[in-house]
Image (spheres, rainbow, N blue to C red):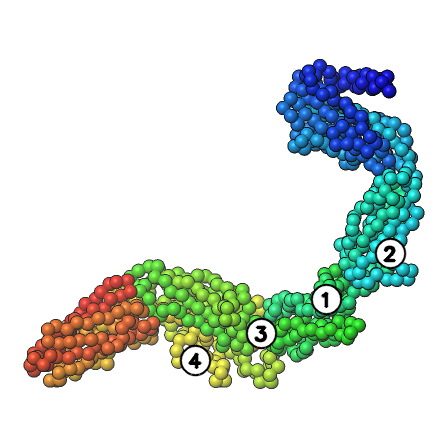
Amino acid sequence: MRLKTVWTALALSVVLAACGGGGGDAGKAPFGSGAGSSTGGTSTGTGTGGGTTPASGLGITLALSSSTVTVGNPATVTATVSNRNGPVAGALVTFSSTNNLGAFTPSAGTALTDANGAAVVALSPASASASGAAQITAATAVNGESVSASTGFQLSATNVAISDFNTGLAAGATLAAYGQTVPTVTITGAGNGTPVTVTLNSTCLASGKARVSPASAVTTTGTATFTYTDNGCGADRSSDTLSASITNATATAQRSLPLAVPTASSLSFVSATPSTIFLRGASLAEQAAVVFEVRDQAGNAFPNRQVTLELSTFAGGLTIEGGSSAVVRTSDAQGRVSALVNSGTVPTPVRVRATLAGPNGPITTVSNELTVAVGLPSQANFGLAQTAANIEGYDYIDTPNTYTIIASDRRGNPVPTGTAINFTAEGGQVQASRTIAITPAGIARADAAFVSNLPKPLDGRVTIVAYALGEESFKDLNGNNVYDANEPFQDLGDVYLDRLYNGVYEAANDEFISLQLPGTVLRAPCVNSNEPELRLDTSVPSRQLDGTTPTCNGAWGQAYVRRAIETVLSTSAARPVWGGGLPGGSSPGQPVILQTTSAAGSLASFDTVNGTVIGSNGAAAGSFSFLLGDANPVRLNPMPAGTSVTVEGSTGVTATVVGGSPVPSSLNATLTGIRYEFDTAVTPGSTRSITIRITSPKGLTTALGVLITR
């Protein structure tokens, strides 16, 4: 034994010299020392070797967990790299074996050292028939210095085989859905006490439809035991093929495991996309995908189940998958089935009924309500409003206003989100286009911003037009929701901007907006309908019908629905005038001639309130009212909405505002009422003054006086 020890040390010194080692620090333990048992150790296990370089003290130690390596008993190889400063992390260590008798995991035979300087690989025989002694070498290079270490190991040939593979079920039995069984694998050919690693795989395991514990079992007794749990794989296949294999050996075995089909426990509606479709031919979404989901008793998606889908109504030619009969669909891997629903010609709510056959009777559910709507805005259902009809915009730019469109189809239902509304303005600036959005209350609405700006018409009045692609309104005499020949309708011509807001297209003043649809044939001037519900109101400027220009085609169809509105750009200064005549016993004030409407020649003479002398006819109290007009040079316009009026009497008379303040939103000058009362000390024939102050929203105050004689 003593001679053998000397020979081992001598052989190790040769390895060190070959690696550039030797000359280590005094007192340092030599690399490669130690001789443990066949089971290995954590620091001085069987077969350690080492080497150093003198410059940096770089060294490497090599340790095997076992000196004997078999197919069923791989060894863990640990190479530890250090220098004078301690462990070296991040060093690349390359492992090799003589004559390539060993196989490494990872297969490249390389590993990086960790924070403790350790690089670890697994060593197993390259084949089950390999035997004899071999040497393993670990080498690394750090900062240009190289070091390596080698040690030997013993290969033992094995003839490991699987002698028995039992699924754990009795002959002819089937594993219940979501049930468990205990497969066992019996090994022969391994030495007594030699660990053998057995792995169990299957199709259901690979797809996640089953679980096995443990994934790999290590046995030293020749029997490996597993717990297999079904996770609904019976929904996809009638059996699972289990495959047992031995690590680093060719021995495998397969068994078929019969699987029971899970039980369907629920059928639920998932979605209808979109939730609203529109009449056939409306040039909008006419098709919706309706989705249902099948789940089994464990709440998991249940594929390969047949579900029958049918519509609750076929009104107006509704179809499901292009027909009027129920359809059968098979659930996919997510347990889902779907069908396409196409609209017809009648607006209607519709549901899809889904039915799934089951051992305890059919399971039935219905979709949420899917709506078939008209979709296109209808002229009769297209409304335009503004925040204020009179804004302080004559003397200022950038005074804001807002125009609101409420758009409905012919059934009075909201038009779809995204419907485009276009705007144009005679003066100022308005947003060119807005899209319909559905409010939380379910209303189809679009808002466009406006600011006062140049140009400003002399009369302070601008026309704004909003229009959108829609359809002409008609009277559905037979209730089929489809226009039929000879049914009354609104024949709409092209859109125009009516600068005078008088309902008549005048080429010299108005702006023509040609929006002819493809295929439109211009025939004649548009004619108003005789039907009361379709007749356009020409008593007020509606901008819906042009009775002179031949832009109508005499046929019902799609058209640009439109509305117009007038906004007054009021001045900041006020010029109140007497409306229906001066108060009794009064002397006239300064006369002014103003235009009262958009019609040509509609002029009227007014007297200004300022400086008027009013006689009270001896009464101790009285009242008067006037039109609170702005200072527009040609038109009797209202003051801006929000204008306030205050009044103050001189000594001996008390005055109050009794109406008309603040000024409301209005296209016309509004009335303001003043009440006065003399003190008892004021004798007949005495005259007192009243001062009226009118303040615009931007703060300009116009003051004027009225004398009252008792």
Q: Secondary structure at mark 4?
A: loop
Cβ atoms under marks 4 and 2 closer than 8 Å: no
Q: Nearer the viewer, residue 239 or 375?
A: 239
Q: Residues within 10 Å of mark 1 (few under 14, many from 20)?
A: many
Q: Earlier in the sequence, mark 3 or mark 1?
A: 1
What's the residue at 40%, 65% (across, down)?
402
Q: Is residue 303 visible?
A: yes
Q: Earlier in the sequence, mark 3 or mark 4?
A: 3
Distance from label 2 to label 1 (Cα)? 31 Å
Judged by depth in the image, the label closer to the viewer, 3 or 1, is 1
Kindly identify which residue carries mark 1.
294
Q: Earlier in the sequence, mark 3 or mark 2?
A: 2
Kindly identify which residue carries mark 2.
168
Q: Earlier in the sequence, mark 2 or mark 1?
A: 2
Which amino acid is tagged 2?
Gly
Residue 210 rendering spot, x and y as whole percentages:
78, 55
Kindly identify which residue carries mark 3.
374
Which amino acid is tagged 4?
Asp
Judged by depth in the image, the label closer to the viewer, 1 or 4, is 1
Distance from label 3 to label 2 (Cα)? 64 Å
What's the residue at 21%, 71% (across, down)?
646
Q: Nearer the viewer, residue 106 or 594?
A: 106
